[in-house]
Every structure is written in C-alpha cells, then in structure tokens.
Amino acid sequence: MVTQSENTNGTHAEPASGSNAAVAATNGDVNGTTGGAEETQKETVPLKQLYEQSTQFSHWRYAQQQLDDMRSKVNQEVVSSIKQNLEEETELRTAQGLSLDDLPQDLKYLTVDDELTLLGFYERRIVKIFQYWKLPSYVMATAVVYMKRFFLENTVMDHHPKDVMLTCMFLARKTENYLMSIEDFSKVLKSPAESILQLEFLVCKTLRFHFTVHHPYRPCLGFFFDMQAVTENMSKLQKVYERALTLIDTALHTDLCFLYQPSQIALAAMRISSKDESYDFERYAKYKFMSNESAAQKYNTQLLPILEAIEKVLKEDRRCVEVDKLVATEIDKRLKLCKDPARNPDSLVFMKRKRGEAMGDDDDDDDDGGNPEKRSKLGDSA
C-alpha cells in the first residue's frame, strides 16, 4: 500500500506510523510520568489512514469482476424488461385494433461495451466543458466520477448519458464550491433547467449522498514535492509531474478510481511519466520505500505489483483513447430505438401502469423489473 493518502479535504497526509501506534500505547500522564506504582497496560489501537475513513474507501471500492458483474446484471435486466414491455404494448394495441408500425422490430440492444463506449464519449465532453470554464481539474474529475458511479447501478437505456452528464456537472460545481445558478448553467449549456433538476435527486440517491470524492491530483503534488529531495534536475522533474497529471486525467476514463487508492494511482502516474521522461524514479523509490530490507521487501511484494497493474490498465484499456464521434453517433441511434415503452407517456403500457397506480394496484408481476420506477428504486437501494 502506498505510504501516502488523502485526508477528508483531499490534502496530502502520512498514514499512521509506528510512532503513532506507540503514542496510542503510551502509559502515564501528559507530562510523561508513570502515574504511580499501579500502572495499567493500555490497549494499543491501530490508527486508520485518513483515506480509509472516507465513504469512498468504505463504499466505492470494487474488484474488476464485481464491476463487470454489476454492469452485466443491470444491462440484462433492462433488456429483459424492455422486451417484456414491448410485448405487452403489442398485445394492448392489437386488442384495441391500433397500428404497430411505429413499434421497433428486431432491435439490436446495447451491450455493456456499447454503454461504456457511449459513456466514455460523454465523459470527454465533461472534460472539454470544464476546461472551457477554466475550473480546477478536481472539479471536472468529481463530475466524471459521479457519472461513473451513477451508471454502475443504472443503464443508458433508462437514462440518456447526456441528461445525466449535465446533472452531474451541475452537482459537482455545487459540491466543490464552484457555484453556478441553475439559470446561468442551463443558459450556457442550452439545456432546460427542468431536465437538469429532474434527475438531481435520483443522482444524489444513487450516489448514496456521498459527495466527497478523493482524486489523485493532491497526492501527485505531494510526490512531486517529496521527489525534490533526491532530484538533481528540477526541470526534468517538472516535466515528469506535468506528464503525470495528464495520465491521471486519462485514468478517469477507466475503472481505476474503483480499484485503487488515489495515492496509488498518483504514484503509478509519476512512475510511468518518469520512464517517458528518462527520469530516475528508482532512486526516489529506494529513498522513500526501501530504507531497510524489510521495507524493500514490502515495496517489491505489495506496492510494486499495484503500480504495475495500474500501468497495464493505462496502456491497454481502450477507454484511454478518445471515442470516435461516428462510433458514438451510431450507438446513440440504436439507443433511441431501445426505449422502454413503460417510460413513454403516450404508450398504452405507460397509461395502464398509471391507472394501476391511481387505483392503488401493487402488481406483484412488476417485481421482475418490468416497471422502470421499481427498477430505479431497486437500483437506488443496492
């Protein structure tokens, strides 16, 4: 594990060390006296790193297989629900002698890969808009992470990523204290204020109201300062740091924020950029992490494999490359056909459900996910 982490304000902090543990186990009063003949042995309480006390550490860490399973489950449930509701819509129209011409036939539903590709396209839109606003990188990163978290439990076939993107951007500006009125926000982005605010509570609920997001930018700055103690070429180190920030921006579009701690991503970025700039990273690693044989063994067996795994993702994950607009447009065209009739106010299925709700009908048949409202509630409580 990296020897640095972020505190609740995102600032650089050292983890609990042996000296801290010793303080927790110290006997006697504040002046260092022993307290008399009857000494009592105090229990040693290990101190957690500040990052480990965050909601991000407690609730938003996953293994890659967990992420794959979650996305696959949500995708399959929604596809099954849309098929079921289309069949019901067809039956209702047939019974009333209405036309079926506008109902889609032989739909090519979006796969998980399709969804991730489309999300990647809109994540890059977030980056460009925040760059235009000239806001700090961490504000932009918070909006991206909000969107990534939302679509762990939802699908683009229920909520278009453009709509969610705008809501996440508006929310991020508020939570990171770069406030902008909804009137100005909607005017600048040429989007109705109602559509942005309509999704805000659902987004907040899906985020479990965990608004603080820790990013690798602050730890990266801390490593930059720390590496100055062993550098002989400040100009090259500056290039290493700037390159590392670019890698952290790229890492946002992968699953790294769910898999590793921000300080680990930051150190991996500094290590990769050191290679790119022909900078001696190993000199710093020996100075910082290999002060003795035990520390060196811990670095080589625990930390180094993590840094190598992060480097592999940044080199091989296709989401590190910007999505071609033509590819995103093709997926979006298919998405428009994959709409759930139960979400269309003009459909017979929607009207039937509304009549059932008005009559207080709690149909158990909807427990399988056929009702989009219930799907949202199930997703929110997951």
Image (cartoon, rainbow, N blue to C red):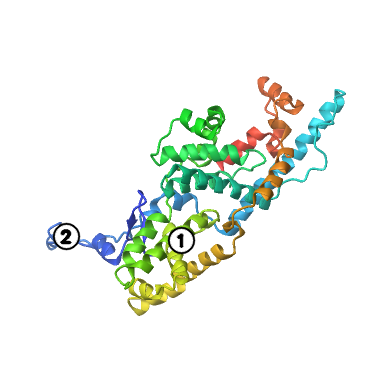
Q: What kind of residue is marked 2? A: Gly
* Lower position in the chain sequence, tag 2 or tag 1: 2
Mark-to-mark CA distance, 2 and 1 = 41 Å
- Residue 300 or residue 121, whichever sits in front: 121
- Name the residue at 57% across, 58% down: 320
Q: Nearer the viewer, residue 277 or 145?
A: 277
Percent position (x, y) of residue 360?
66, 22
Q: Position of residue 101 (x, y in %)?
A: 84, 31
- Helix, strand or loop for disc 1: helix
Residue 176: name its quadrant.
top left
Residue at (46, 74) in percent of width and height: 301
Quarter that holds the N terminus: bottom left
> For mark 1, does the 10 Å Cα neighbourhood hold few (<14), some (14 to 19), or many (20 or more) residues?
many
The residue pinned by badge 2 equals 28
Secondary structure at badge 2 equals loop
- What residue sits right under mark 1 in the picture? 265
Residue at 45% from the left image edge and 50% from the top image edge? 56
